[in-house]
Image (cartoon, rainbow, N blue to C red):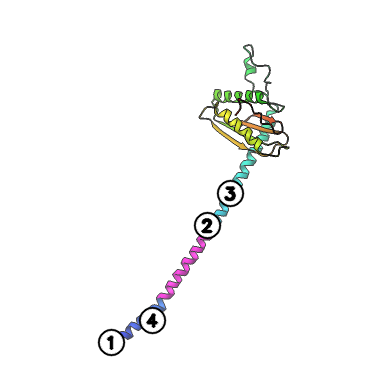
Amino acid sequence: MDVRQKQLLCYRVTSFSSRCVSPVFAHVISIVRHLHSFVKIVQMKVKQISKRLLISIALAFCFFLTASSLFAQEKSKDAPCRPIAPEDTANTPSEIRALPYCFPTTPVNCETALFYLDDLASKVQKNKFESVIVIGRIGKREKSARYNQTRLNSVKAYLSRRLPKDVKFVMATGEKAEGNAQLEFYVDGKLFNVFSFARNDVASCAGLG
């Protein structure tokens, strides 16, 4: 085969490669680009769905806490209880001692708050309860949430020194109360007590906080 024939053969091979290989390569690039675009769209959709799912879970949790609070308060209205005064003595019958203390009907002061907190810690330790949840709500006429946070922090500091270390202890902020500010105490998922506070009062004292 002379030089001219070799050149002609090379030209034909090159021409065939350009016509066949280049379109195939371009088609592959197109497919890759479409796949890349599809992946980006899927990632965006997943992020949107995840965000909506988190919002839905948060709303459902808030609804659950509110519903549990209302249900527990309604259920506890007719439950037998005893006042904090007079104090127990050696002659106090055991059936009276077994009754829980009635919820305070007026805003608590420092002394009353400490009494109820000590009672909660004692009951948790004695009955080996596993969890304590405290939900704080600012009062209807309170302008700042810092009062609620101060109450929660004080209770957290006080109970943390008295509850067993293995008890799950959770603090949370709820929606604004209809009347006075309040703290709700749940023990193993059941409403244990509710404190109310006068406007902008945190019931601060030397022993609390």
State which quadrant residue 139 falls in. Answer: top right
Q: Is residue 35 left or right of residue 7?
A: right
The reply, left or right, for residue 131 in relation to residue 31 is: right
Mark identifier at residue 3: 1
| Type of amino acid at the residue the image marks with label 1 | Val
- Seen in the picture, residue 103 relative to 4 is either above or below; the reply is above
C-alpha distance separating marks 3 and 2: 15 Å
Name the N-terminal-most of marks 3 and 2: 2
Q: What predominant SS class does the magenta segment belong to?
A: helix
Q: Secondary structure at mark 1?
A: helix
Q: Amino acid at mark 2?
A: Gln
Judging by the rendered image, the residue that carries numbered circle 3 is 53
Q: Is residue 169 visible?
A: yes
Residue 43 is marked as 2
Task: State how far apart marks 2 and 4 are (Cα).
Answer: 42 Å
Residues drawn in magenta: 21-43
